Image (spheres, helix red, strand yellow):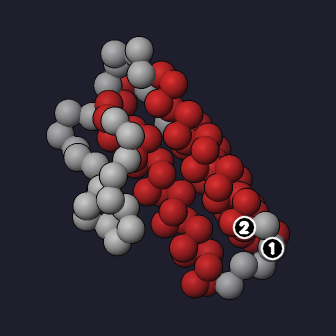
Amino acid sequence: MILRAIFATALLLANSWAWAGDKKVAAEHPSKVTSTWFELLYGVVKAEKTPPPPASRAYGVAAVALYESVVGGTRDNRSLAGQLNGLNSVPL
């Protein structure tokens, strides 16, 4: 179940690529969606009584997916592709 939650989170965060026509930088968008998704993920981890190693992995995957979904809209940050094991490339 936790893997489904992670996968759903990654897909929904990746949906931000659909906003490619929006020329605002990431900092100009509200962070409410991010907060809501991490609260939801926390609820899933707590409800399933996920042990610490898998829970921390779930939070890590969700955080990387979030970062990669907004890094294109930032001026000073760069993608984690090539810096993390197994993350060789991501769509622009």
Q: Of all residues shown, which one is farthest toward the left?
A: 76
Callout 2: SS:
helix
Q: Residue lying furthest right in this view? A: 47
Rendered view: 74 above or below 50: above
Q: Residue at x 62, y 79 (%)?
A: 54
- Judged from the image, the secondary structure of the residue bearing numbered disc 1 is loop
Relative to 57, is 75 above or below? above
Residue 88 higher or lower than 75, as above or below: below
Q: Crowdedness of circle 2 by 10 Å Cα count: few (<14), some, many (20+)?
A: some
Residue 26: x and y, percent? 36, 30
Where's the N terminus, which quadrant?
bottom right
Residue 75 spot, x, y in % from top left: 20, 33
Residue at 72% x, 67% y is: 2
Residue 79, above or below 70: below
- Judge left or right: residue 49 versus residue 92: right
Q: Nearer the viewer, residue 36 or 66?
A: 66
Q: Are marks 1 and 2 in contact (CB under 8 Å)?
A: yes
* Residue 7 figure quarter: bottom right
Q: Amino acid at mark 1?
A: Glu
Taking 76 as reference, is 91 left or right? right
Q: Residues within 10 Å of mark 1 (few under 14, many from 20)?
A: few
Viewed as shown, does residue 86 lie left or right of 75? right
Query: Of the residues shown, which amino acid type is indicated by label 2?
Result: Ile
| Quarter of the C terminus within the rendering | top left
- Residue 54 visible from this viewpoint: yes
Q: Nearer the viewer, mark 1 or mark 2?
A: 2
Q: Is residue 69 left or right of residue 73?
A: right
Quarter holding residue 80: bottom left
Residue beneath label 2, please? 2
The label shown at residue 48 is 1
Q: Estimate the x, y position of residue 74 in percent, counting from the top left.
A: 27, 34
